[in-house]
Image (cartoon, rainbow, N blue to C red):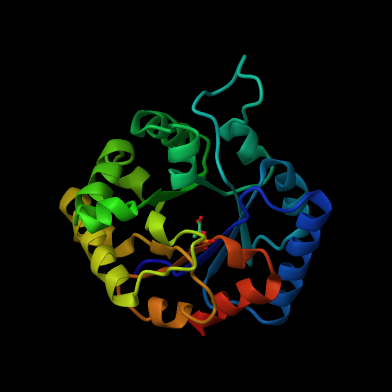
């Protein structure tokens, strides 16, 4: 059975004090009302060490939003997977469409990042998803398959157990437009079939496939009720305790 997960992606929001406040608030809310799923918060690099000290890691896992494609050395401004891991973080988001689009992260670069993250003991939230143009041309299945093949399908089955897939249609990210539960289920089932083809049915059944794109407390229950949707990767609605907790509670 795939783990049920709700993960937050804070993106470039919250200064350090605001981030600490948000992490503390979430920690308290979940201590008072234990979640029925794994919870992950992915924060900017500068928050990681401090947030790691604050949260109860038995209830909230910590992740970064990115890591470098190089192990160490003269790469000014970069943060390595090893550095991320040393903060107490357990996860890293890789392949987010914003990084692919604005920072030109190619499948080859992402493959390097994936290998370094795994070598340093991090689990990966690996994002895939099509643009509006690609969906209108009915290319979504080919796009997500190519994204998996390009950056994670070189892994052994044992390594692949550390990958959580996040399907995020680009046209639904931050736009308020959510894929319908049926649209999301259709492509999640396809993604699982592609994983099964590559790694077998058991690995596919154990792979968590999250939905991301304008997910909120009001639409999460319908999305999470679908058999191939194992939770969500949440942007905007992860920035307030009540909103994020509302999505976590969709698993109750
Ligand atoms: C995201 O960017 O990972 C995301 C899902 O954003 P939002 O929830 O704001 O659409």
For residue 83, what is the image quadrant?
Answer: top right
Q: Where is residue 111 in the image (x, y as percent from the top left)?
A: 38, 33
Residue ranking furthest to the left: 197
Q: Where is residue 72 in the image (x, y as percent from the top left)?
A: 59, 21
Which quadrant does the N terminus fall into? bottom left
> Residue at 34% of width from left, 51% of height from top?
131
Q: Where is residue 211 in the image (x, y as percent from the top left)?
A: 41, 64
219 vs 80, left or right, is: left
Q: Where is residue 163 in the image (x, y as percent from the top left)?
A: 40, 50
Q: Against 214, is 112 above or below? A: above
Query: Is residue 162 visible in the rendered structure shown here?
Result: no
In depth, the one of 222 and 79 nearer the eye is: 222
Residue ranking furthest to the right: 17
Q: Against 222, is 96 above or below? A: above
Query: Is residue 28 visible in the rendered structure shown here?
Result: yes
Q: Against 85, is 175 above or below? A: below
Q: Against 105, is 94 above or below? A: below
60 vs 37, left or right, is: right
């Amino acid at each position: 059975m795939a783990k049920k997960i709700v993960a937050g992606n804070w993106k470039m929001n919250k200064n350090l004090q605001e981030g600490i406040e948000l992490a503390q608030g979430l920690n308290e809310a979940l201590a008072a009302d234990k979640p029925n799923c794994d919870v992950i918060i992915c924060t900017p690099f500068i928050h990681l060490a401090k947030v790691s000290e604050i949260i109860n890691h038995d209830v909230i896992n910590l992740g970064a939003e990115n890591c470098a494609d190089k192990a160490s050395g003269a790469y000014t401004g970069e943060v390595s997977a090893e550095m991320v891991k040393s903060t107490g973080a357990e996860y890293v988001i890789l392949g987010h469409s914003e990084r692919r689009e604005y920072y030109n992260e190619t499948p080859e670069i992402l493959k390097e990042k994936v290998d370094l993250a795994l070598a340093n003991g991090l689990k990966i939230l690996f994002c895939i998803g099509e643009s509006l143009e690609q969906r209108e041309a009915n290319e979504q299945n080919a796009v997500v398959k190519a994204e998996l093949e390009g950056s994670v399908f070189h892994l052994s089955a044992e390594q692949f157990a550390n990958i959580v897939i996040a399907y995020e249609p680009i046209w639904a990210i931050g736009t308020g437009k959510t894929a319908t539960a049926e649209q999301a289920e259709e492509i999640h089932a396809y993604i699982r079939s592609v994983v099964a083809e590559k790694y077998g049915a058991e690995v596919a059944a154990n792979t968590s496939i999250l939905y991301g794109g304008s997910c909120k407390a009001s639409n999460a229950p319908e999305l999470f009720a679908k058999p191939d949707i194992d939770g969500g990767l949440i942007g905007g609605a992860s920035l307030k305790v009540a909103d994020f907790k509302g999505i976590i509670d969709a698993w109750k």
